[in-house]
Image (cartoon, rainbow, N blue to C red):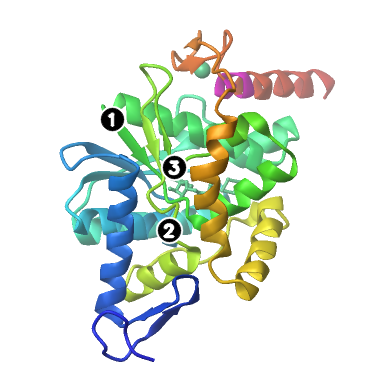
């Protein structure tokens, strides 16, 4: 098998693109795909400061690496979710990546913030699945860090597999408001929100894992212990089976939705946002979703003490 670009011996075959590359050409292909996604979707420009949310996993570290190499002005953000050994290992990978390259990384340990709540504590107190509390906490701290740091853009490492699985879930349940918002660039709907972008939305998990490996990026390989059996993983498995039989299906599912499906779902009205009475971030009611969850933890704890 020969590299489609330089005719040297190929080391990576990408069936979805019907192509194969040697090491330097794959690195070029990956970075070029990221750059194209940024340019085509008008995600950001070279003069803008970008906050990259890094989890210590392959996608977000591959993204950060590619953005730096492409000459973008970036800083990293790592949220310590307090999920035991998994969080400790992820933080170590994110820190090591930044240190080795002399990049600036802000670490926000959730259990040391003013609310002092890590994800397991919130999940246990509210009896919610950890992932649902985690989503609310991540969104809040991403928004807050980007706003307070004066960044116009926040980039995450969501990849093609994530986008295809999310789309499948939204289509299976005809989640119209979510379908209307499923796009790689979310423009701010409030002055305290920043633009949120997913430059890897056309890049598969296989591609980011290959890129991370070839670039010598050390990343946390374990999945979050709470993700076992998560619905998203079921969708990913199904989509992988489909991809195996019909290479290119995932990319077509997502990109055809964006070009042909999404315009049909855009009528969902965006309610006007005020500011949260407690934290000052954008909110649809008196409190934002994050502060409502924190208040619920407080209430449940008080009830537990009263009943003990
Ligand atoms: P996930 O929701 O775990 O699939 O992660 C999606 C993206 O969110 C990752 O690619 C990162 O960009 C970001 N992310 C997830 N966890 C963290 C974290 N603990 N700190 C910072 N960013 C994160
Ligand atoms: Fe949020 Fe696992 S990363 S619960
Ligand atoms: Zn709030």
Q: Is residue 80 magenta?
A: no
Q: Is residue 290 magenta?
A: yes
Q: Which residue is mark 3?
A: 184
Q: Where in the figure is residue 260, as x and y percent of width and height?
A: 53, 43
Q: Does mark 2 have its CB less than 8 Å from ligand 1?
A: yes
Q: What residue span does the magenta drawing correspond to?
A: 289-293
Q: Where in the figure is residue 146, as x and y percent of width and height?
A: 34, 31
Residue 228 appears anywhere in the view: no
Q: Is residue 79 above or below residue 93?
A: above
Q: Which residue is mark 2?
A: 59
Q: CA distance from mark 2 to mark 1?
A: 21 Å
Q: Is residue 105 above or below residue 2?
A: above
For residue 231, side relative to residue 137 (left or right): right
Furthest residue to the right? Answer: 307
Comes first in the chain, label 1 or label 3? 1
Residue 72 appears anywhere in the view: yes
Query: Within the image, what quadrant is residue 180 found in?
Result: top right
| Numbered disc 3: secondary structure | loop
Comes first in the chain, label 2 or label 3? 2
């Amino acid at each position: 098998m020969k590299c489609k670009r330089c005719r040297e011996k190929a080391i990576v075959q990408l069936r979805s693109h019907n192509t194969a590359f040697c090491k330097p050409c794959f690195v070029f292909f990956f970075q070029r795909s990221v750059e194209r996604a940024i340019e085509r979707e008008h995600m950001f420009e070279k003069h803008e400061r970008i906050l990259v949310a890094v989890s210590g996993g392959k996608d977000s570290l591959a993204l950060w690496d590619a953005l730096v190499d492409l000459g973008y002005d970036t800083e990293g953000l790592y949220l310590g979710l307090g999920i035991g050994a998994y969080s400790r290992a992820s933080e170590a990978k994110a820190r090591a990546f930044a240190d080795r390259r002399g990049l600036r990384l802000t670490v926000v340990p959730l259990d040391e913030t003013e609310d002092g709540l890590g994800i397991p504590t919130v999940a246990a107190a509210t009896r919610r699945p950890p992932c649902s509390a985690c989503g609310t906490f991540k969104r809040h701290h991403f928004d807050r860090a980007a706003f307070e740091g004066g960044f116009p853009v926040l980039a995450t490492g969501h990849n093609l597999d994530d986008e295809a699985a999310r789309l499948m879930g939204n289509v299976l349940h005809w989640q119209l408001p979510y379908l209307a918002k499923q796009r790689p660039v979310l423009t701010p709907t409030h002055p305290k929100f920043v633009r949120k972008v997913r430059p890897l939305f056309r890049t598969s998990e296989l591609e980011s894992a290959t890129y991370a490996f070839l670039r010598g990026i050390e990343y946390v390989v374990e999945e979050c212990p709470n993700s076992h059996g998560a619905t998203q993983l079921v969708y990913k498995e199904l989509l992988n089976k489909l991809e195996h039989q019909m290479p290119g299906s995932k990319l077509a599912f997502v990109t055809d939705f964006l070009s042909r499906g999404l315009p049909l779902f855009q009528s969902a009205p965006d309610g006007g946002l005020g500011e949260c009475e407690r934290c000052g971030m954008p909110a649809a009611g008196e409190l934002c979703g994050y502060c409502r969850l924190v208040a619920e933890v407080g209430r449940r704890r008080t009830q537990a003490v009263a009943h003990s």
